[in-house]
Image (spheres, helix red, strand yellow):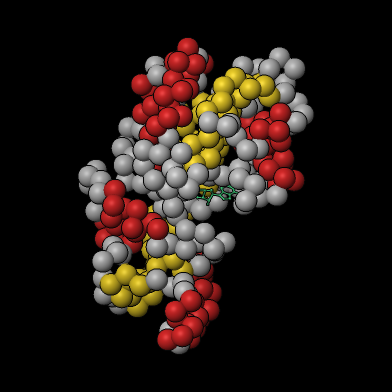
Amino acid sequence: MVMSARQFYSGNDGSTDWVRESEFFAKLKMRNGTFKLTQPSRFRELETAFRPLLSQRATQLREVLDVGVSTGVTTVELLRYLEACGANPKITATDLFIDAHIVEVAPGVRVLADPEGWPLQYDVAGLAIRPWIRRLDYVSLAFIPRHLAKSMLQPRLRALIRSGRSEPVQMITRSLSRDDSIAFVEDDIMRRSPDFAGRFDLVRAANILNRSYFSAAQIRSAVSNIRSYLSGAGSLLIVTRTNEKGENGGTLFEVGAGGTFTVLMRVGSGSEVEDLILGCPAP
Ligand SMILES: C[S@@+](CC[C@H](N)C(=O)[O-])C[C@H]1O[C@@H](n2cnc3c(N)ncnc32)[C@H](O)[C@@H]1O
C-alpha cells in the first residue's frame, strides 16, 4: 500500500527505504501531467568517465546547479560523487515542482496539494487515494467523483494554503541528510532567474533537455539561460540522457575563452542536443 503524505513526512528519521519512497513519489501527478520519476544509481558509467577530469578541476567546483532534479535522489548522489572527486560544493537543485502542502480539510481527511491547490494525494483516515483519473476510471465511472472532488476542492485548498492553514513540505528525497549542502528551489529552466546569474562553476542537466519533450527553440532558450548562470571561462556543463535500456549518453562541455561552449568529453554517442549547445552564443 502506498504511504500517505502524512506517513511519509512524519517518518523522516534518517532511514531510507528507496522502494517505498519511489512508490510514494511515483503516484504524485503534477499539474502539467508528469509524475515524480527518478531512480537511484542511474549514472554509473557517466561518473566513471567524467571522474578524472572532475577530480582535476575539483577545487574549482564551489557552486553547482542541478536542473530538473525530480525528487533529488540523483542530486544527493551528485554531491557524494563530487565529494569523492575531492570537491566540496554547494549544490542548488531545481525543478518546476518542489513545494507542496498538507492541508486538513475535515477531521481525518487531509490533502497533499501543490501551492496552487492542485491535489496530489487524498488521505482519508490514513488511506492514500490518488486524485488523478486513469483510463479505467472512465469505464467504471470513478472519474465522476474524482473530477468533482478536484474541482470543488482546488479553490478551497488554495485559499487555506494562502492563509497559512497548511503544513508546508518539499517533494524531495529522504536520503538527504541535515549536513548536506543542497538547497532545493522551484525554478523553470525556460525563464531566466536573475538570482542565478554568473554563479555556477558546474551545471548538470540530466534527462531534461530532451528533443522528445521540448522543441529546439525551447531547448535553445533553456541553454541560453544555463549559459548565463555559469561563472565564465572554464566553467562546466554536463548534459545527459538515459535511454530505455538504462544506458546513458552525455557530453561534458566547457565554456571557452570566447564565451561559447566546447566539447571536453562524450559518453556513448554524446548529448542529443549537442548542436544546440555548441550553437549557443556567448552572453
Ligand atoms: C525525468 S526527470 C529527471 C530527474 C533527474 N534529473 C534524473 O535524471 O533522474 C525530469 C524533471 O524535469 C522537470 N522539469 C520539466 N520541465 C522543467 C522546466 N521547464 N524547468 C525545470 N524543471 C523541469 C520535471 O518536473 C521532472 O522532475
Q: Is residue 106 above or below residue 181?
A: below
Residue placed at 58% from the left, 31% from the top? 270
Q: Position of residue 260 (x, y in %)?
A: 72, 23
Q: Is residue 248 above or below residue 127?
A: above
Q: Position of residue 200 (x, y in %)?
A: 57, 27
Quadrant of residue 278 in the image?
A: top right
Q: Is residue 227 visible?
A: yes
Residue placed at 52% from the left, 28% from the top? 267
Q: Position of residue 181 (x, y in %)?
A: 40, 31
Quadrant of residue 195 in the image?
A: top right
Q: Is residue 277 above or below residue 85?
A: below
Horizontal placement of 154 versus 45: left or right?
A: right
Horizontal placement of 191 versus 242: left or right?
A: right
Q: Position of residue 80 (x, y in %)?
A: 36, 28
Q: Is residue 88 visible?
A: no
The N terminus - image quarter: bottom left
Of 48 and 87, the residue lying toward us: 48
Outermost residue, top side: 56
Residue placed at 56% from the left, 26% from the top? 266
The C terminus - image quarter: top right
Residue placed at 52% from the left, 59% from the top? 34
Of 49 and 214, the residue lying toward us: 49
Horizontal placement of 64 versus 1: left or right?
A: right
